[in-house]
Amino acid sequence: MWGGGPIVPNSDEDVIEGYAEGKTKAETVARALLKHLEEKRSDLGGTNAERVRTAFRGLDLHPRIAAVATDLYLNGHHNEAVFNASKALVNLVKERSGRYDLDGAGLMTTVLSKNTRSSPSTISRTRRTRTSNRA
């Protein structure tokens, strides 16, 4: 980066001096930008881990998913949180669809397929049956 004046340098020493000045100016600008970015980062929630926790807390998760995953995720056990959330989702889909004979991808493919989707009456009937069994 050139830091010398607008006049064409007269000697090699002038060129070296101009580039040295440019380097100093560039370092000063880079330090100022870095300081500004660090201030912005702290304004936005500090470390990357803190921002992830804040973002997770802002999610509108189904209560069953939140119950099994939130504490694990916030404590850094991300793999276990995702695994437990997946299991809870599968169980929730089984309950809502009444398809206890299927699991995993087969369950999701069958239940969520446009061709074999359970009718609202089937899901309502499943809910009514479960509710009446609890009484």
Image: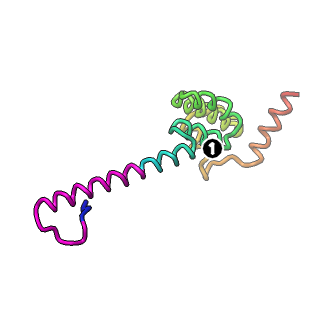
Image coordinates for residue 62, horizontal then vertical, percent: 69, 39
The image quarter containing residue 59 is top right
Identity of the residue drawn at 61% across and 52% down: 114
In the image, residue 102 above or below residue 124? above
Quadrant of the frame with the C terminus: top right
The image quarter containing residue 97 is top right
Could you tell whether 3 is left or right of 54 in the image?
left
Tag 1 secondary structure: helix
Q: Tell me the magenta residue range.
A: 5-33
In the image, residue 8 above or below residue 14? below
**40 or 71, which is in the foreground?**
40
Identity of the residue drawn at 57% across and 46% down: 43
Q: How is the image coloured?
A: rainbow
Determine the residue located farthest toward the right in the rendered image: 135
Look at the magenta stretch and give its main secondary structure: helix
Image coordinates for residue 98, horizontal then vertical, percent: 70, 36
Image coordinates for residue 133, horizontal then vertical, percent: 84, 28
**Residue for badge 1:** 111
- Residue 8: within the magenta? yes
Identity of the residue drawn at 57% across and 30% down: 81
Determine the residue located farthest toward the bottom in the rendered image: 7
The image quarter containing residue 95 is top right
- Residue 44: within the magenta? no
Identity of the residue drawn at 26% across and 61% down: 3
Image coordinates for residue 8, horizontal then vertical, percent: 17, 71
Q: Residues within 10 Å of mark 1 (few under 14, many from 20)?
A: many
Residue type, mark 1 in image: Val
Quadrant of the frame with the N terminus: bottom left
In the image, residue 87 above or below residue 115? above
